[in-house]
């Protein structure tokens, strides 16, 4: 019984240009003399370097630890000596440098001691940690850390596991050749993923322009005795998008802002499944991948390439023509122009295209948008690209977000059909970058404001705590004086003390001083003669009489100014 298939909105049918690179089997690219291994090769945080210059490493040895929840480890692609750990040019359109481990190969390609676990009896969290430390990420282009996707959905299981073998972009055939030649490893990886997700069914979607891959996968499924279904889907770009393939195979359309796991579906690339098999069954971390080399070359083909291999050395194996102007990582629809010829192959590199003026002609002049809505008809996400274009061009980023800018998968269908030759995807990328930059600035400002407010709160709290301590100490002092029968401070002094703890402390100190003075007894008064004692008593009596008769300074009348007539006569000479 044939499975019912569904359609997704939009899409285009560009020339596939896949035949030339599938005429020969996968070849192994030679080990380069030097490899540049970037530490940031997954969606999320970069890895943390574990090696130092001068250190000797073996193939498969971990040289970078996962730097966070959304990160994966990095391993030495071959044995050699670490030349440096420093920023290097990476395959990104910006041309920026990022930290990388530079390794000089020793030519031995000697493996480190590999670790194995039995995923069937190992707790799931330990299996996911093992996959993370094996550096496995999505090889379909998104490089999302695979261990994070190996979690069952709600209810502890997943209804449908989808393996993506559509490979819809022109020129790219790495997944096609992988399925033809290593189908048994892909099926083994699918079985591991099904075990981890507790999936009820496994669907392997392959475009119907790959009959050899479909046959090889069906044969491998039968040989392994697995209950998996290999489904041929119609050839239409971008059928290889995760949401588009899920729609075609299951009829489920994942709404805006939600994930496929919310609907019991999880999707993996066939190359990712093969890497999971190698990591768990063979103990091999992800140190190489299959890369298609095509475009302006004499002998297009597919190679198993060590991560960190310079792209120009890889293209040289296929005989690049002299009019090659630049290299593109990826296909002609979603590929990114490289800032140099010698940037390294990374985990996201599924294809390297040698570009000439015929394959990538200079862009024609951009014409005004005529609102023909052809872009909206072709958009597989059912957006309104012409509206997003106007909002992006006018930098009205709020409106662009209202029109679901971040649902755009940057497939390039809109720009492909635009009669005005507007580079629509470039505008969307610009808007996304600006929005992300502003969000980062806002987050930094919010963090600074929170730090400032907490500092003020802490200072006020410390001030209140200090005042409370002073007040408590003053109250304790007054209580002690009261117990000792000492006269307390005047009521007038207590009022300011209640108002200000510092004044209360001062009043308490004065009270203590008076008490100490009252307690002082005259020294050397023993064995005095009766006459001396009488003199002392007489002096004390006069002093007390004077103190009783004295008027306080605050109540004494102020002296009046003397009249001129009261002044004494000047002395006469």
Image: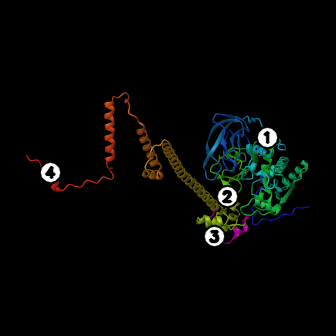
Residue on which the image places disc 3: 369
Residue on which the image places disc 4: 568
Mark 4 or mark 1, earlier in chain = 1
**Which quadrant is home to the N terminus?**
bottom right
Image point 73% across, 60% down: which residue?
258
Q: Residue furthest left?
A: 573
Image point 84% across, 63% down: which residue?
5
Whole-angstrom CA distance, mark 3 to mark 4, is 108 Å
Q: Nearer the viewer, mark 3 or mark 2?
A: 3
Disc number for residue 283 = 1
> Could you say which is closer to the camera, residue 521 or residue 156?
521
Query: Over which residues does the magenta segment extend?
Result: 356-381
The x, y position of residue 305, in whole percent, is: 73, 44
The x, y position of residue 476, in whole percent, is: 51, 44
Q: Is residue 377 a member of the stretch shown in magenta?
A: yes
- 554 displayed left or right of 303: left
> Could you say which is closer to the camera, residue 294 or residue 225?
225
Q: Is residue 456 a member of the stretch shown in magenta?
A: no
Mark 3 or mark 1, earlier in chain = 1
Mark 2 or mark 4, earlier in chain = 2
Whole-angstrom CA distance, mark 2 to mark 1, is 41 Å
């Amino acid at each position: 019984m044939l499975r019912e298939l569904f359609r997704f909105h939009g899409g285009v049918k560009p020339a596939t240009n896949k035949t030339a690179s599938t005429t020969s089997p996968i070849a192994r690219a030679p080990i380069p003399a030097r490899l540049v291994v970037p530490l940031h090769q997954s969606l999320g945080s970069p890895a943390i370097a574990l090696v130092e210059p001068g250190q000797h490493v073996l193939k498969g040895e971990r040289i970078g630890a996962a730097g966070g929840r959304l990160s994966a480890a990095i391993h030495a692609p071959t044995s050699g000596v670490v030349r440096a750990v420093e920023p290097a040019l990476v395959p990104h359109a910006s041309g920026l440098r990022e930290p990388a481990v530079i390794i000089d190969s020793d030519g031995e390609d000697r493996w480190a001691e590999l670790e194995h676990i039995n995923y069937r009896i190992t707790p799931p969290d330990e299996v996911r940690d093992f996959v993370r430390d094996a550096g496995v990420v999505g090889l379909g282009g998104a490089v999302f850390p695979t261990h994070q996707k190996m979690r069952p959905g709600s209810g502890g299981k997943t209804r449908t596991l989808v393996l993506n073998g559509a490979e819809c972009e022109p020129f790219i055939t790495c997944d096609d050749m992988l399925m033809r030649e290593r189908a048994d490893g892909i099926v083994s990886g699918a079985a591991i993923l099904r075990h981890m997700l507790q999936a009820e069914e496994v669907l392997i979607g392959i475009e119907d322009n790959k009959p050899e891959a479909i046959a090889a996968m069906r044969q491998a499924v039968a040989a392994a005795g697995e209950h998996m279904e290999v489904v041929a889907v119609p050839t239409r770009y971008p059928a290889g998008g995760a949401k588009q393939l899920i729609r075609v195979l299951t009829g489920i359309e994942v709404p805006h802002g939600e994930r496929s796991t919310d609907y019991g579906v999880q999707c993996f690339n066939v190359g990712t499944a093969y890497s999971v098999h190698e990591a768990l069954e063979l103990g091999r971390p992800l140190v190489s991948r299959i890369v298609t080399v095509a475009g302006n070359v004499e002998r297009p083909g597919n190679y198993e390439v060590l991560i960190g291999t310079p792209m120009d050395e890889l293209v040289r194996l296929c005989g690049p023509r002299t009019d090659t102007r630049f290299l593109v990582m990826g296909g002609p629809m979603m590929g990114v122009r490289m800032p140099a010829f010698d940037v390294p192959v990374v985990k996201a590199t599924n294809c390297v295209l040698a570009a000439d003026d015929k394959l990538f002609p200079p862009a024609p002049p951009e014409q005004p948008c005529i609102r023909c809505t052809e872009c909206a008809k072709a958009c597989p996400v059912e957006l309104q690209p012409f509206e997003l274009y106007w909002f992006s061009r006018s930098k009205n980023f709020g409106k662009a977000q209202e029109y679901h800018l971040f649902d755009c998968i940057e497939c390039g269908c809109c720009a492909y059909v635009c009669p005005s030759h507007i580079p629509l995807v470039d505008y969307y990328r610009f808007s996304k970058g600006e929005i992300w930059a502003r969000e980062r600035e806002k987050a930094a400002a919010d963090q600074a404001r929170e730090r400032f407010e907490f500092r003020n709160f802490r200072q006020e709290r410390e001030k209140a705590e200090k005042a409370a301590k002073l007040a408590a100490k003053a109250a304790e002092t007054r209580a002690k004086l009261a117990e000792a029968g000492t006269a307390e401070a005047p009521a007038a002094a207590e009022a300011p003390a209640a108002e200000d703890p510092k004044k209360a402390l001062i009043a308490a100190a004065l009270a203590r001083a008076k008490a100490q003075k009252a307690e002082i007894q005259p020294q050397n008064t023993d064995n005095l003669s009766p006459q001396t004692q009488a003199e002392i008593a007489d002096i004390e009596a006069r002093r007390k009489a004077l103190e009783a008769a004295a008027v306080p300074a605050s109540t004494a009348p102020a002296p009046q100014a003397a009249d001129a007539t009261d002044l004494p006569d000047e002395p006469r000479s």
